[in-house]
Image (cartoon, rainbow, N blue to C red):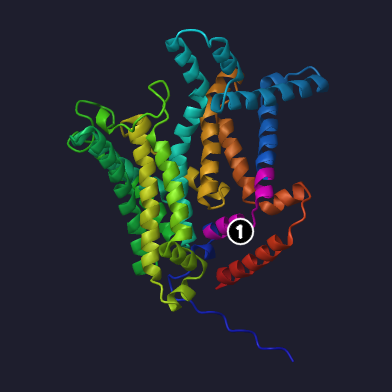
Amino acid sequence: MTEPAAPAREEAPGTEPSQHYPFGKIFSEALEANNVTVTVLALVAATVLGGILCAFTNPVVLHAPGAGAMIARAWDVASGTYVALFEGSVVNPHTLAALFQQASIPTAIHDGFLSAVFGPLSETAVAATPLILAGLAVALPYRAGLFNIGGQSQFIGGAIMAAWLGYAVNLPVFVHVVVCVLGGFAGGAVTGWVVGEVKARTGAHEVIVTIMLNYVMQYLLAYLLSSASLLQAPGSPNPITPPIASDAHLPLLAGSNLRINAGFLIALACAFGVWWLLNRTTTGFEFRAVGANPNASRVAGMNVERSWALAMLIGGGLAGLAGAAVIGGTDFTLNPQSYGTYGIDAITVALLGRGSPGGVVAAGLLFGALHAGSPGMQDVTGTPVQIVQVLQALIVLFVAAPPLIRTLFRLRATRAAARGAGTSGAAMSKGWNA
C-alpha cells in the first residue's frame, strides 16, 4: 500500500526566494553543482577555445599556403596572444631582466625600471578593485535569497555622491577622502535599500525592480550632467562633473608612477568583512537561513523582510564603494561612461567566484588581469581587445554548465556532488513548479 503524496507546500505571495525564478535558478545551480576541478577545467576549456578563435580569425593564419603552415601560424598567434596578455597584466620578463641589468645605475633610473616591472600588476589591481566590490554586491544578497542585478544603479548612486562630495565640499586632506568613500557607500546603500524595502513590503521581485532602477539611475545621471546648476562642470559643453579635489583622491600605494591605490585595500577589507559577516555573526546566519528557506526562517522567529532589506542595503553599499573607488582612484570626474559594464561584470565575477568572498576576489583579479592586459595584447599581436570579452563569455558559459565540462573531460561526478545536485534539483523543481 503506497503512502499518499504529501500536499504541495503553500507559500505566501512574494516570499519565494530568488532561486525559484529563471535568473536565480541558473545562478543557484551553477554555484551548487560547481566544484574547484570543474571551475579550473572551465577556465582551461575557455582558454583553449579562445585561442582557437584568436588564431582562425587572424588573416595571417587564414592566408597560410598549406595546412602545416596554417597550424604553425595558428599556434604562433594563439600563444603570442596569451603571452602578450600575461606580460601586460602580470609581469614582462624583458622588463624584469632589464631591471637586474641596471641594478647599479642611479636610484631615479632604477625606480623607473621598478615601476615598469610592477606596472602590469598595478593595472591588474586597479581594474580588479571595482570588479571585486561589485561582485561582492551580488554575492552577499544572494546568500539571503536575493538576485541583485542592480549593480549599475547602485554604482551610479555611489559615484554621484563621491563625485559631488569630492568637488563641492572643502574638508581637510584625510577627512575629505574618508567622507567621499563613506558617501559612495551611502549612495549605493540607499539605492539598494529601496529594492529590498520594496520587496519586503510589496513582494515585488528584486530582478524586475533592479532592472527598472538601472534605467532610472542611468537617466537620472544623464539629467544631472545636463545642467551646470546641477552636476555639469561650468563652461563645459560635455556631460561631465568638475574634477574632484586632490584632497579627495584615494592615496597611491606605490608612488606616483603606479596607479594602484587604497581602493584595492578597501576591496580586500570588504571581502574579509563580508566573510566575517556571513560566517561569524548572527545577522549572517539569518541571511543564510533566509536564503535557504524564508518560510522556515519566519517560523523560527526571524524577520525575513528585515533581512532582505538589510542584505540589499549592504550589497548596494558595496556597489557604491565600487563607484567611489573609480571616481576617487582613477577617473576623478563622473560622466555617462563611468559606470561602464560593472553591473553585468559583477554577476560574472560572483558566478565564477561561486558566491564566496574569497572566490570573488580571485575572480575579480582574473578579470582585472584580462582587462589590464588587453591593450598591450592588441598593440603587440594585433588581436582586438574584444577577444577579452569573448574569453569572459566563454568562461561564464563553461562555469555555468558543469555537466558540459564533465562531459568534455569525461569526469565522474563525486557522490557528494551527485547527492547535492540531486537535492538541489529536487528543491529547484519544487520551487519552480510551485
Q: Reply above or below: 273 against 83.
A: below
For the question of whether residue 137 can be seen, the reply is no
Q: Residue furthest front?
A: 104
Q: Which residue is mark 1?
A: 32
Which quadrant, please, contains the C terminus? bottom right
Is 33 magenta? The answer is: yes
The stretch of residues the image draws in magenta is 24-41
Indicate left or right for 227 with 409 as reference.
left
Indicate left or right for 7 with 58 as reference.
left
- Residue 124: x, y in percent? 50, 31
**Residue at position x 28%, y 36% in the image:** 177
For the question of whether residue 282 can be seen, the reply is yes
**Predominant SS of the magenta segment:** helix
Which quadrant, please, contains the N terminus? bottom right
**Residue at position x 64%, y 68% in the image:** 423
**Residue at position x 69%, y 25% in the image:** 79
Report helix, strand or loop for mark 1: helix
Q: Reply above or below: 344 against 113.
A: below
Indicate left or right for 419 with 388 as reference.
right
Tell me the crowding category of disc 1: few under 14, some 14 to 19, or many 20 or more residues within 10 angstroms, Cα based. some
**Residue at position x 46%, y 41% in the image:** 131
- Residue 185: x, y in percent? 32, 47
Is 181 magenta? The answer is: no
Q: How many marks?
A: 1
The picture quadrant where one finds residue 376 is: top right
Q: Type of residue at label 1?
A: Glu
